[in-house]
Amino acid sequence: MRAVIVAIGVAFLISLFCTPIAIKVFARLKAGQPIRSNLGLASNEGKKGTPTMGGVVFILATVIAYVAGHLALTTLPDAQIAQVEPTITALVLLGLMVFSGAVGFIDDFLKVRKRHSGGLNKRGKLAGQILVGAVFGAVAVYFPSSMTDAGGNATNTETVGSTTLSFIRDIPALEIGKIGAVIVIIMVVMAATNGVNLTDGLDGLATGASVMVLAAYALIAFWQYRHWCADPNYPAGEYCYTVRDPLEIALIAGAAAGACVGFLWWNTSPARIFMGDTGALGLGGLIAGMAMSTRTILLLPILGGLFVIITMSVVIQIISFRTTGKRVFRMSPLQHHFELAGWSEVNIVVRFWIIAGIGVAIALGLFYSEFLAAVS
């Protein structure tokens, strides 16, 4: 737990104190967010030129905090350190965050360079998401752990990802094979990155919702670590989780949540910096990795309920307009529908945070109730 707390604290402080530096640097480079003035949105007023690409700050803060968390582990007994040395789990999770963020960075860079909100075209962004999901999905599925006990016997041969679909844990009846697992991971990465990106339309909305989801994954992963089948000290025969490196997962999730809280200090209304696609795609990639590594893929739509609702509003709007020529909402994503209905930006953000919190609470309730039911 000490390592997780250290990672959270370091990430928070780096993000809190380095974001103002990023604001000055991006402002000097004239890396302002292009704003479409013809949409009639009150939230766009006065935001032209606000620095974007702020996601760079909390992505770097998460990586640095991960390293700091591992340094804190040197104070723990050797037996515990052996279970949480830097692993492929960290490579996959941080890789998904960094390289998904890199796709977003290219998009942001093109927007700033062209002084236009277009950025990277849809095919380019889609290709980038598929490539990132495929590479790290393959690593997650094809490289098992080689953890052994003092006698040289294997204690954990799990991969980061699973070849079965999962809800609270793996569902043995839903075996999909390694290739199927990689395809599912690609789909989850695409869904999560686009979901967070669509949610990032008002000051602090996506950042605050992501904090809740990442904090929930930190709790889930740490609970799995305390009830880990591969732990040689865990009582034999008791209910446990067959995952790989859960403390690594908790450490990264906690670090990312802490980094987002520090960033939110500057990103909340009125935002002095936007996360941009750099941050939105980076967070989406990490959240997808969390669902995969904790074996809770089918729980993600509940845990990230706000992202699902906002994404579906766009899907419904497109289908309705193309089939009937009519719009269901005044504008999509959904937050802009309420904005055009007269809600203030702050009211929308706070109420949508409440919806995000409800989804997280329901998902955590399902997760822990499954454990309680199993041990009762």
Image (cartoon, rainbow, N blue to C red):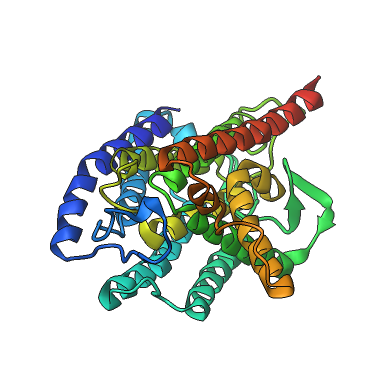
Q: Quadrant of the N terminus?
A: top left
Q: Residue at x 33, y 41 (%)?
A: 269
Residue 47 x/y as whole percent? 28, 55
**Extreme top residue here?**
376
Foreground pick, 31 / 329:
329
Q: Residue at x 38, y 74 (%)?
A: 119
Q: Residue at x 31, y 66 (%)?
A: 34
Q: What is the total number of numbered labels drawn onto the structure image?
A: 0
Residue 314 x/y as whole percent? 61, 61
Foreground pick, 371 / 188:
188
Foreground pick, 221 / 209:
209
- Residue 75, image quadrant: top left
User: Where is 275 relative to 106, above or below?
Assistant: above
**Extreme left residue here?**
28
Q: Quadrant of the C terminus?
A: top right
Tell me: 184 left or right of 199.
right
Residue 6 x/y as whole percent? 35, 32
Residue 364 x/y as whole percent? 64, 32
> Is residue 295 visible from the viewing direction of this image?
no
Tell me: 5 left or right of 168.
left
- Residue 141, image quadrant: bottom right
> Is residue 176 visible from the viewing direction of this image?
yes
Tell me: 166 left or right of 346.
right
